[in-house]
Image (tube, grey):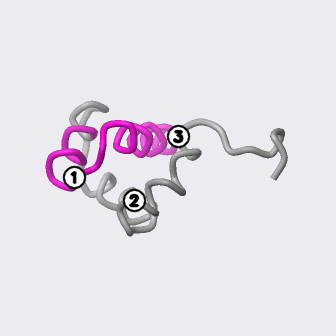
């Protein structure tokens, strides 16, 4: 993959999230969809407290989830 093909933004964290927590990204996105209509930081806090994700990983998943929800 060249620098011009490099994944940017929240999705750039996905390989590390999958490796660190042993679940596919879709697992975490399903949890976010099931969480209902919460604000960004409420979702981040939920992933951190209930599922043990680090702040950066939780934030990346939530940012990606909310951006897709707006489309």
Q: Is residue 52 magenta?
A: yes
**Image quadrant assignment for residue 58:** top left
Pointer 1 local density, CA inside 10 Å: few below 14, some 14–19, many at least 20: few
| Furthest residue toward front | 20
What residue appears at the point 35 percent right and 62 percent down from the top-left corner? 21
In the image, which residues are magenta?
44-71
Q: CA distance from mark 2 to mark 1?
A: 11 Å
Work out whether residue 4 or residue 28 is closer to the camera in this orientation and state it. Answer: 4
- Check the image and report above or below for 26 versus 4: below
Task: Give the x, y percent position of residue 14.
Answer: 51, 53
Circle 3 sits in a helix, a strand or a loop, which is it?
helix
- Report the disc number at residue 52: 1
Q: Which residue is mark 3?
A: 10
Say whether disc 1 or disc 3 marks the residue closer to the N-terminus. Answer: 3
Say whether disc 2 or disc 1 marks the residue closer to the N-terminus. Answer: 2
Q: Which residue is mark 2?
A: 20
What residue appears at the point 30 percent right and 43 percent down from the top-left corner? 54
């Amino acid at each position: 993959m060249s620098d011009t093909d490099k994944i940017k933004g929240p999705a750039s964290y996905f390989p590390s999230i999958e490796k660190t927590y042993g679940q596919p990204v879709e697992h975490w996105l399903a949890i976010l969809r099931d969480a209902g209509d919460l604000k960004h930081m409420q979702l981040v806090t939920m992933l951190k407290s209930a599922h043990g994700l680090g702040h950066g990983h939780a934030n990346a998943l939530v940012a990606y989830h909310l951006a897709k929800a707006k489309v």
